[in-house]
Amino acid sequence: DVKVTQSSRYLVKRTGEKVFLECVQDMDHENMFWYRQDPGLGLRLIYFSYDVKMKEKGDIPEGYSVSREKKERFSLILESASTNQTSMYLCASSSYRTSGKAYEQYFGPGTRLTVT
Amino acid sequence: AQTVTQSQPEMSVQEAETVTLSCTYDTSENNYYLFWYKQPPSRQMILVIRQEAYKQQNATENRFSVNFQKAAKSFSLKISDSQLGDTAMYFCAFMKLQGAQKLVFGQGTRLTINP
């Protein structure tokens, strides 16, 4: 089974802090994604990566950056956390190669981040 | 840009009843996938069912089936013989086949199955 893990389930940070959210997948997937989930808005794509060191902006990249130095790890960085970044953050991965399950994204358990 | 709309923020049914969740989408693409994801209180997002747009036959997975109306851009999820474990947030999602495998999600429907 594919496993996607995220470094924290709950995180509390102060305004202005630099925040790192880590995501690791164990299935050699090429694609990795960061979403944020807010009530009434569903999930919105922040950034994604289709290969090591490759990244593309999603729909709401402002205030965020990402890093993918190794294939299995995709980090989301909040350079200077603000209260409007309080949210649930979900990481996902997928592969073009997975037989019979192409295009399926596998999700981590989520990190609930509170910025005070 | 693609958009996905789920017009039912919340639904509630009795155990063993059948329930249908609505989803509409807007796209100019011809080749795409549609998905229903389930997020139970544990927060782990799980794929429920997937539909390829080029297939006319509606997808089914045990008690879960879809009604895919391509011309109407409608993709509803039917849950038969609902169970308490079906209580969750349900998200409809769209993915175009060209380019990166990005999902566009609807707002979600909170489904509660009552005993």
Image (cartoon, helix red, strand yellow):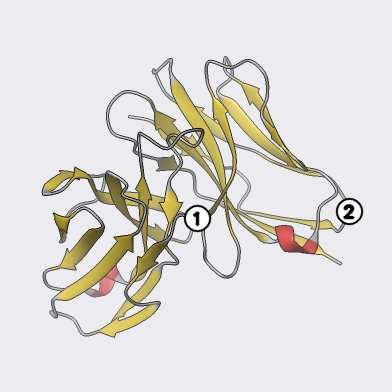
User: Which of the 4 image quarters holds residue B85?
Assistant: bottom right
- Left or right: residue A16 versus residue A40 is left
Label count reads: 2
Which residue is under mark 1? A1
Q: Amino acid at mark 1?
A: Asp
The quadrant in which the C terminus of chain B is found is: bottom right
- Left or right: residue B22 versus residue A52 is right
> Observer-nearest residue: B94 or B24?
B94
> Mark 1 falls on what kind of element?
loop
The x, y position of residue B9, in whole percent, is 60, 53
The x, y position of residue B101, in whole percent, is 34, 36
Residue B97 position (above or below residue B78) = above
> Observer-nearest residue: A81 or A23?
A23
The residue lying at 88 percent from left, 53 percent from top is: B16
> Observer-nearest residue: B5 or B61?
B61
Identify the disc placed on residue B32.
Answer: none
User: Which of the 4 image quarters holds residue B66?
Assistant: top right
Q: Residues within 10 Å of mark 1 (few under 14, many from 20)?
A: few
- Left or right: residue A2 versus residue B115 is left
- Left or right: residue A44 versus residue A22 is right
Identify the disc placed on residue B16.
Answer: 2
Residue A39 position (above or below residue B2) = below
Asked if one can make out residue A42 in the rendered structure from this viewpoint, the answer is no
Q: Amino acid at mark 2?
A: Ala
The residue lying at 35 percent from left, 40 percent from top is: A95
> Observer-nearest residue: B41 or B55?
B55
Chain letter belonging to callout 1: A
The x, y position of residue B15, in whole percent, is 86, 58
Residue B81 position (above or below residue B39) = above
Gap between marks 2 and 1 measured at Cα: 30 Å
The residue lying at 68 percent from left, 38 percent from top is: B77
